Amino acid sequence: MDNTSRKLVFIIGIGRSGSTMLDLMLGSHSQGFSLGEISKIPEIFACHQSVEAFCPGSDFWPSHFTGQEARQLAQGLSNHRIHQRIPLRLERAVREFIRQDQIFRPYTLLFEKINSPLLVDSSKYPDWVANKIKTRELTQGTIQVYLVNVVRDARAVLNSYLRAFPDLTVEKFAHRWMNNLESCRRILNRYPAQMQKQIRYEDLATNPHSTMQSICDWLEIPFEPSMVQYWKKMHHYVAGSLSTRALIARYHNHPIPDLVQKIHGQHYKSVDLSIKLDERWKQHLDPEVLSHFYKLIGDLNRPFEWNS
């Protein structure tokens, strides 16, 4: 693969805003591969010491990465010290100076082992992404980096979070949402305008073909209609939305994860396999909870409100 053709898409935003769905659509392109939330690889590898744990039930990762390569990937993606006695910043600087910095080139390793010219990282956390795009690996020009900021009506995001995390308070969610919004703005303000794009979950759900066409035009790759039916392709992404994974499992006649059924009941057993706008917040979100939430965030959600 020609190094100059390598394209890396970072998806940033808050969870439950369609990032996994977009990741999988792009990963369904003939040139693409969905990495999922690979920021979690260091934690996964530390717990299991196994490449199989990256995507349980899939043989993709162990067939493409040796144990040593998986360890190198986990260390390269981590923001923590590799050696206890050497500060990470110092080790990075020394290795870059003597050109022995392979361990700090995790995306290069991913491109080499996966052999797809378009990789999609839906780790989402803006501060984590900001740290990665400053690295020498991604500033040399051998990998083209794109940022997609996925946004969604905060009322729907709030409802989804409260459904998944019953003990979460509205105050904690409001703080998380506002902090994520500001963190995304900071990273986007520092990044070239032509290399970033904002996508609304609602546009993706109601007009998937035209939305994906615009993204493909921006990435300078041909639009493939099959991308929209992402559940037909076998994906090997790390972590990510269990709900989205449930639809893929259903299509391939695999069991739906128990946790999905615990949170959503029979919803993902009965819903047909197509992209639909999820506005369950209109029926499920307590008006008093919503009023309290709006008092906490003021007018910040107004640009994202979707009143269909």
Image (spheres, rainbow, N blue to C red):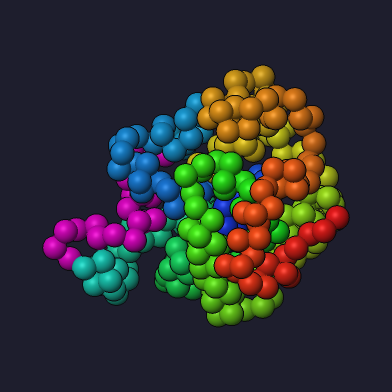
Q: Is residue 244 visible?
A: yes
User: Does residue 259 appear to the left or right of 151 in the view shown?
Assistant: left
Residue 118 drawn at (x, y percent): 62, 54
Residue 294 drawn at (x, y percent): 64, 65
- Residue 79 lies in magenta, yes or no? yes
Q: Is 82 drawn above or below residue 205 in the view shown? A: below
Residue 270 drawn at (x, y percent): 75, 25
User: Does residue 54 appear to the left or right of 86 in the view shown?
Assistant: right
> At 69% from the left edge and 43% from the top edge, which residue is drawn?
284
Q: Is 195 drawn above or below residue 216 in the view shown? A: below
Q: Is residue 116 visible?
A: no
Across the whole image, how many numbered discs are drawn on residues? 0
| Quarter of the C terminus within the rendering | bottom right
In this picture, which residue range is highlighted in magenta? 65-86
User: Does residue 5 appear to the left or right of 44 in the view shown?
Assistant: right
Residue 293 drawn at (x, y percent): 60, 61
For residue 155, what is the image quadrant?
bottom right
| Quarter of the N terminus within the rendering | bottom right
> At 80% from the left edge and 56% from the top edge, which residue is drawn?
203
- Residue 179 lies in magenta, yes or no? no
